[in-house]
Each structure stands twice: as structure tokens, then as C-alpha cells.
Amino acid sequence: MKAAGVSVDGCASDWIRAPCNRRQRMHELSIAHSLVEIAEEAAAKAGVTRVTVVHLRLGVLSGVVRDALLFGFDVATVGTRLEGARLEIEEAPLQAYCADCDAVVTLSNPQRFRCPRCDAPCGRIVTGQEIELTALEYEENAPEATAS
Ligand SMILES: [Zn+2]
């Protein structure tokens, strides 16, 4: 028997799904730890010893408190390849699929899940809940000879 309805929106394991109904500092700290773990793994695979910037996409409905996450990130990176790295957060807008318009529409009001074009209720969120690691910037481990 297969579990149904589990969608990761076509994205790979870089995604972190987090419960968004709890507002606790611990929440952001554990997200930060997960992020650092994933970034560390990616950096290790790429043979990178020092990550300088971590890019994150944060949905407006992710339930994550930005400042708490930044703080948690600084704590979680200590002693890792990411220590001292900057966390760049890009806010992802709330987008939903409208069946009536057969289109993905951007909802400006997270409290009101209705299509801005036709006013039909939009149940399926496309973006806006994600906590997604999008890119890492790092220092190249300069080999002996580098072309200038
Ligand atoms: Zn519509």
C-alpha cells in the first residue's frame, strides 16, 4: 500500500518540510540545525571547506520567524563549514492553483484563499509554505595553480 498525497512539488531532498503551527524559538533553532546539516552535506560532497553564504527561500506561510531563524543559524553553524556564513533569506510569495482559471495565481492576502481573478476559492497552495535551501556560496579551495 502506498501513502497517497505526499507531494514535494517536484523538488529533491533539499526541501525541508516543517510543521508551521508552532511558534516557538525551538522551532526555528531546529530548522536552522536541519538547514546546516543539509548545507554541510552538500558542501562536503562538493569538497568545500568553507561556506560563505547560504540562500534560503522562505514562504510567507512557513510560520518561521525570520529573526529567530537568523539567530538559530548563527548558533547552529558554530564548528561547521558554515561558521560565519551569512544567511540570505528570500521571501517566497503565496501562490495557489485556481482550477477555474487553470492557472497559478498569487494571493496577496494569506488570510483569504481566493483567486484574485475570478474569486473562486483556491485550495491548493503552490508556493508560500516552503523552507528551501536554494544555493550555497563558498570559497574555492584554491589549488596550486589558478588561472587569473
Ligand atoms: Zn481563478
Image (cartoon, rainbow, N blue to C red):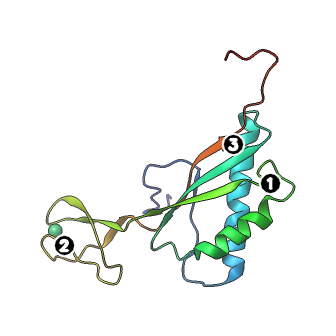
Q: Counting residues from the N terminus, which is met first, the one under dot 2 or under dot 3? A: 3
**Residue at horizontal 78 percent and vertical 30 percent from the top:** 141
On screen, 140 above or below 63?
above
> For the residue labelled by badge 1, is the local secondary structure a helix, a strand or a loop?
loop
- Number of residues whose C-alpha sits closer than 10 Å to that of mark 3, classed few (under 14), some (14–19) or many (20 or more): some
Residue nearer the viewer, 102 or 42:
42
* Comparing labels 1 and 2, the label whose residue is closer to the camera: 1
> For the residue labelled by badge 2, is the local secondary structure a helix, a strand or a loop?
loop
- Number of residues whose C-alpha sits closer than 10 Å to that of mark 2, classed few (under 14), some (14–19) or many (20 or more): some
**Residue at horizontal 66 percent and vertical 76 percent from the top:** 68
* Comparing labels 3 and 1, the label whose residue is closer to the camera: 1
Q: Counting residues from the N terminus, which is met first, the one under dot 1 or under dot 2? A: 1
- Distance from disc 2 to disc 3, alpha carbons, whole Å, reads 39 Å
Residue where numbered disc 2 is placed: 116
30 left or right, relative to 7: right
**Residue at horizontal 82 percent and vertical 17 percent from the top:** 144
Tag count:
3
- Distance from disc 3 to disc 1, alpha carbons, whole Å, reads 15 Å
On screen, 24 above or below 96?
below
User: Which amino acid, mark 1?
Assistant: Glu
User: Which amino acid, mark 3?
Assistant: Ala
Residue where numbered disc 1 is placed: 83
**Residue at horizontal 14 percent and vertical 70 percent from the top:** 117
Q: Residue 19 carries which label?
A: none
Q: Counting residues from the N terminus, which is met first, the one under dot 3 or under dot 1? A: 3
- Distance from disc 1 to disc 2, alpha carbons, whole Å, reads 43 Å
Which quarter of the frame holds ligand 1?
bottom left
* Residue 9 position within the rendered picture, expressed as x and y whole percent measured from the top left: 42, 54
Q: Which residue lies furthest to the front in this view?
A: 148
User: Which amino acid, mark 2?
Assistant: Pro
Q: Residue 42 carries which label?
A: 3
* Residue 126 position within the rendered picture, expressed as x and y whole percent measured from the top left: 36, 62
